[in-house]
Amino acid sequence: MQPLRILIPGRYWDSHIYAGRLYLFGLEGDIRSIDWDSLIENWNIRDELRIALIYAFLHSDYLYGHDLQYLFQDREIENIIARKFRELAEENLYATPRRLSRHIIGQQGNPCPFPHTDTEIYHQNLYVGGPSGLVRATCNKKTKYPVSTRPEKIWDAPILGMSASYDSIAIAAGEEGLFELDTNGTGYDPNRHDSNEPKPLVDNPCRDCNWAYYSIFASSDESGFLASYTKWVDNAYDSHAERRFEGVRKAGDIFGSLGYSWGVQDKLCQAVENGIRVVRYRPWASKSEDRLKHLGTVSLSSWKGSVISASVATFGVVIELENAIVIYPSSGDPITLSGEPVNWRIFPRSKHYENQLHIIYEDRLEILSFNHDYLINQEEKLLGTSFMRQRREQRTSLGELIAS
């Protein structure tokens, strides 16, 4: 099934969603913050479809979390929700400029370096990285503007990619290597002058990075590497876990070949000719040989161009090629979105938006919501698990392998 889609017209460079707010970075050098909760909750749509709209774009945790799992185990309720999703997919979800203007919280000239290469919002701070370095600005509901007007310059080195977790920002700094900034879980204080610069981890070149549990996988033009960590506690009564650096595993050694590689959480991937190799990563395994398990290679049809970037989301694998973005969902057929994007972003560690994919084109932002896993569950019950099992055995997709 195709994902649900909200289209927001305009010329943007980047977007981010965090704590009920949608942040739009305009190509003219401005930032707007949109009350995302209000925009979705007050959308002009049939009342019977409102619950599906909210689940799809505000609360993915309602469908895939544990809090309401017993409610959705009820066959009648599941069938009703699935039907609402199918009907919602037929609606034209277009955020007109007038509709969007009613939910603007704030707008300002961008006080951060622009254009940037990547952004991250973490602990109510906006981190902006680019050729001139890294800055940090307050980003919370107390500020009058979308972000504070006095961003703090943290670092001068050029930045290509960032990812936040474990009270740290992992930073891909190109030829400079992989770095990590300790945030200490605290908010930004503009009067504080003792902030630490990012510390070097690995001096291998990298242009993107993401967290594989408490380790970091870095991607490079040729291949990539895993900066491996272990979690350590003083004793069984100590709730604080410390990350300890173990070493570096090159992607060539992990996959047995070279090629653009990427990884998020327990899945590491590598693009090879007409295919993707997938490795499961389990850093907690007691034996080192059990920490990396080859799941296989999925053959894919020829692509239109080389791999530019890729990532793993809860809903599947997203691969940007020279002429298209291809999504391999955890269930179902691949989805090809033709055209060259300005930018795209997923939110794999978000609680409410992990099912979203933001794609910016020259004249619009498209926010895609993937809910196919829920609908596939309904299909299995309608067609029978034996039939669905037989169909899956006949075609193992990349998304299904990732979801295994």
Image (cartoon, rainbow, N blue to C red):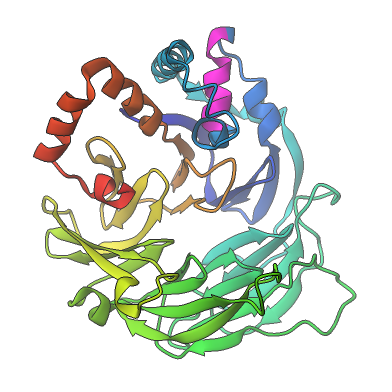
Does residue 158 show up?
Answer: yes
Q: Is residue 93 above or below residue 331?
A: above
Q: Does the stretch in magenta take in 52? A: yes
Q: Does residue 296 appear left or right of residue 56 in this picture?
A: left
Residue closest to the eye, 223 or 111: 223
Q: Does residue 363 appear left or right of residue 298 in this picture?
A: right
Residue 212 horizontal/vertical position (percent): 45, 66
Q: Does residue 255 appear left or right of residue 39 in this picture?
A: left
Quarter the N terminus occupies? top left
Residue at image position (74%, 73%) is 184
Does residue 222 show up?
Answer: no
Q: Quadrant of residue 191?
A: bottom right
The single residue placed furthest to the front in the displayed view is 236
Residue closest to the eye, 16 or 7: 16
Residue bounds of the magenta highlight: 48-57
Q: Does the stretch in magenta take in 101? A: no
Q: Is residue 343 above or below residue 6?
A: below
Residue closest to the eye, 17 or 14: 17
Residue 232 horizontal/vertical position (percent): 58, 78
Residue 180 horizontal/vertical position (percent): 58, 79
Residue 384 horizontal/vertical position (percent): 22, 20
Q: Does residue 99 appear left or right of residue 150 in this picture?
A: left
Residue at image position (31%, 54%) is 319
Residue at image position (30%, 52%) is 402
User: How many marks are shown on the rendered structure?
Assistant: 0
Q: Is residue 381 above or below residue 361?
A: above
Secondary structure predominantly adopted by residues drawn in magenta: helix
Q: Quadrant of residue 174?
A: bottom left
